Amino acid sequence: MEYVFLVKIAFSMFQNTLAFAQAQDAKDPLKSYRTKFHIPKDAEGNEWLYFCGNSLGLQPKVTQEYIQQELKDWANLGVEGHFDAKNPWMPYHEFLTENMAKIVGAKPIEVVIMNTLTTNLHLLMVSFYQPTKTKYKIVIESDAFPSDRYAVESQLKFHGFDPKEGLLEWKPRKGEELLRMEDLETMLEAEGDEIALLMIGGVNYYTGQYLDIKKIAELGHAKGAMVGIDLAHGAGNIQPNLHDSNVDFAAWCTYKYLNSGPGSLAGLFVHEKHAHNKELNRFAGWWGHDKETRFNMRFDFNPIPGAESWQLSNPPILSMAAIKASLDMFDEVGMDALREKSETLTAYFEYLINEIDTDRIKIITPSNLAERGCQLSIQVKNADKSLHQKLIDRHIITDWREPDVIRCAPVPLYNTFQDVYRMVDELKKCL
């Protein structure tokens, strides 16, 4: 209720004018960070309006320097760069751990950067999806990101179960778009004895709904199930407080809100309570082996305590350099400041959308600040992708999702109040 009240206060202070947006930008303590990013431009050098950070974040200008440093050390040192580079490659992933842990609310022992998102989900399910003949079902949200669905379906098949029986969907009620926690409780009460794993998207890619991760963990654990979270649309956007949530595992990509480049490496979280359990099933590789004896080459696998033990191979340094560039900026700004601006900027966006005099538009993302990040999903009645193209023609980059939703993310690091005002003004013209 507190968050809803604060939104109402903000709405009463907002004004649907360019002058108001300019005034907000002038007093924004994070305004200088926009200049630290490459903003797409047209042929005449005019900046586009970019609202697609929930799909691919913009490139920090400093990223090139970070990558060039590693290219320089590779050229000058060859293999000795593993030890003598400015940022030695052997422990390079460790340079990322502390800053990433701050972003997702974890302890350093619980976090590692490795592989890509769905790969990490599979590796984690090897450890945390241990079905029996009677307890084998997996719960996902009904409109989960397709890769999550494919992953859990293939895990069920791999263990000899039919996904039609083993996959349970947490669905919105008829006529609604958002998930209700009480419906998950009902499902767990009815089928909890047969549920082995809850694998839930912490922020739904389609609606932008931010779910109560801690409550999900409580409900799942009460029925003896493991709980995993996909934070692809959450990391760098909301503050999931993974350690305190008590979820067993989580994974996320770094190329959306974390601005590390297309297809960049992903993050992985394993709760500290599992850190020293060497009996967990896992697919092992040498980079997860005890660092002191890793290069002796003759030892049985001895996992490093914590998330690092899920590593397989030595990591791609060039990708990690881009991640390091972004994480250093996040550490400089801090998630508290980013979240504060995000709430205000997205509330202003919502206010302007609601000011449009039409019955064709509906925001399906929650209004409650505690239940969303910076994404707003705008459903447009009787629209098709031609509306998205009209925005592109006006140099506005958003994200279209079938059948009739425009996903827009005003990212606090580089989007402005003027961006939001101009975008809504152009949307009105398109309608």
Image: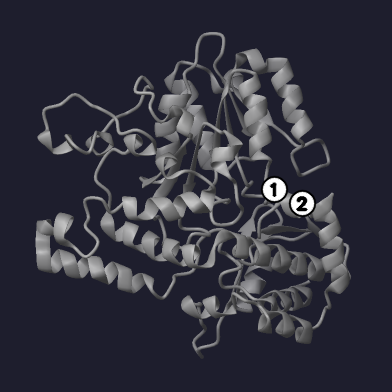
Q: In which image quadrant can residue 382 be found?
A: bottom right
**Residue 356 visible in rendering:** no
Name the spot of residue 287 as percent of width and height, x first. Answer: 25, 39
Disc 1 marks a residue whose amino acid type is Gln
User: Looking at the image, what colour scheme do you see?
Assistant: one colour
The residue singled out by tag 2 in the image is: 366
Q: CA distance from mark 2 to mark 1?
A: 6 Å
Disc 2 marks a residue whose amino acid type is Pro
The reply to whether discs 2 and 1 touch (Cβ–Cβ < 8 Å) is yes
Name the spot of residue 27 as percent of width and height, x first. Answer: 68, 81
Q: Callout 2: few (<14), some (14-19), or many (20+) C-alpha neighbours within 10 Å?
A: some
Q: Is label 2 in a helix, a strand or a loop?
A: loop
Name the spot of residue 31 as percent of width and height, x first. Answer: 59, 78
Apparent side of residue 6 relative to residue 86 in the rendered image (left or right): right
The residue singled out by tag 1 in the image is: 209
Q: In which image quadrant can residue 80 be found?
A: bottom left
Q: Find residue 274 and name its label.
A: none
**Residue 53 visible in rendering:** yes
Q: Residue at x 22, y 35 (%)?
A: 286
